[in-house]
Amino acid sequence: MKVFLAGGSGVIGRRLIPQLVAAGHQVAATTRLAAKTTLLQSLGASPVVVDALDAPALSKAVTDFGPDAVMNQLTDLPQRYNPRKLGPFYERTSRLRVEATRTLLAAAKEAGARRFVYQSIAFMYAAAGPAVLPEDAALALGAHEPFGSAVRATAEGERLTLSADGIKGVVLRYGQLYGPGTYFDRSGDFARQARRRMLPIVGSGSGVFSFVHVDDAAGAAVAALERGDGAYNIVDDDPAPARDWIPAFCHEVGAPAPMRVPGWLVAFLAGSFAAATLQLGRGASNAKAKQELGWTPRHSTWREGFTAA
């Protein structure tokens, strides 16, 4: 199958290309930076240098390649994660999830592609109901800014994907990514924060997180080329409250034990979104992905995966 991968040099893209090639697919992968073409070639893809928000250029790149399937794995996030400074990055990522998705879908249809795979997130559910939620649970469309705008844009990208005429759309809602190149990498920014005691347990630490190793996230995208129709949580089997995973992560990266701080202090220092997530966030169920995509995470729990990573 010919696969056009938008976002080939990103965290998921770099792990996805070798899996696509190993499965026998021919891959064209995009990057904004000409300096990354050598990397994409070394992974087995044909590099395409294009700004994904340049609609005519992106559309031409897709139609010139003539893919059977198109993937949107585009994001634009900072190397250092500061909740109070995420606004500009969320704004560009939101544009990539709406404007670039619209462009890619139109070009995919023109090229005769049959499938479209869209990167979404599994940590945008409203803080209501059970601690672990399925795909039909309510989304946090009214969340504190800037996350609320990001959720609404992500949901709009999902709608575009799933309502496209003549193309089978698959939405992959990824959990918190860990592994090479992620914030949770040993050299990633959350490890830096943990070593500086900037990753505390907030309040009771009841906010539930669902993780997924970046290689398992890539594996789900490969599976989605053949199976699936709709939205799927791509997470491991072990949703966990912050009070469990934060101390374990600190231990793995050689950081001191985390501090415990009240929610009001984190809301003041890092913003309401960070405080709410660490105290009220909901995890996600992977049952539907296992059943319909035939996907099972090789790293079934972050408890082992953190160590392996």
Image (cartoon, rainbow, N blue to C red):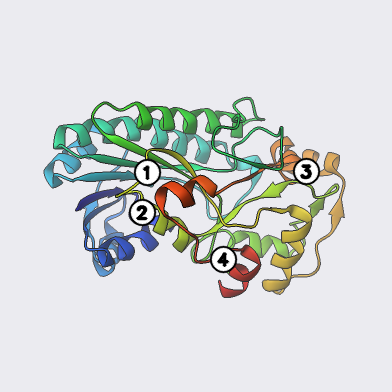
Q: Amino acid at mark 1?
A: Gly
Which residue is located at x 34 percent, y 36 percent?
169
Left or right? Give the position of 131 relative to 27. Answer: right
First reached walking from the N terminus: tag 2 or tag 3: 2
**Whether residue 54 is visible:** no
Q: Quadrant of the C terminus?
A: bottom right
In the rendered image, which residue does mark 2 sit on? 223
Which residue is located at x 15 percent, y 37 percent?
111
Q: Secondary structure at mark 3?
A: helix
Q: Amino acid at mark 3?
A: Gln
Q: Nearer the viewer, mark 2 or mark 3?
A: 2
| Category of crowding for the residue at label 3, using alpha-carbon neighbours closer than 10 angstroms: few (below 14), some (14–19), many (at least 20) | many
Residues at marks 1 and 2, CA–CA distance in whole angstroms: 8 Å
Q: Nearer the viewer, mark 4 or mark 2?
A: 2
Q: Amino acid at mark 4?
A: Asp
In the rendered image, which residue does mark 4 sit on? 185
In the rendered image, which residue does mark 1 sit on? 228
Asked if residue 140 is positioned above or below residue 243 in the image, the reply reads above
Mark number for residue 159? none
Residues at marks 1 and 4, CA–CA distance in whole angstroms: 30 Å
First reached walking from the N terminus: tag 4 or tag 2: 4
Q: Secondary structure at mark 2?
A: helix
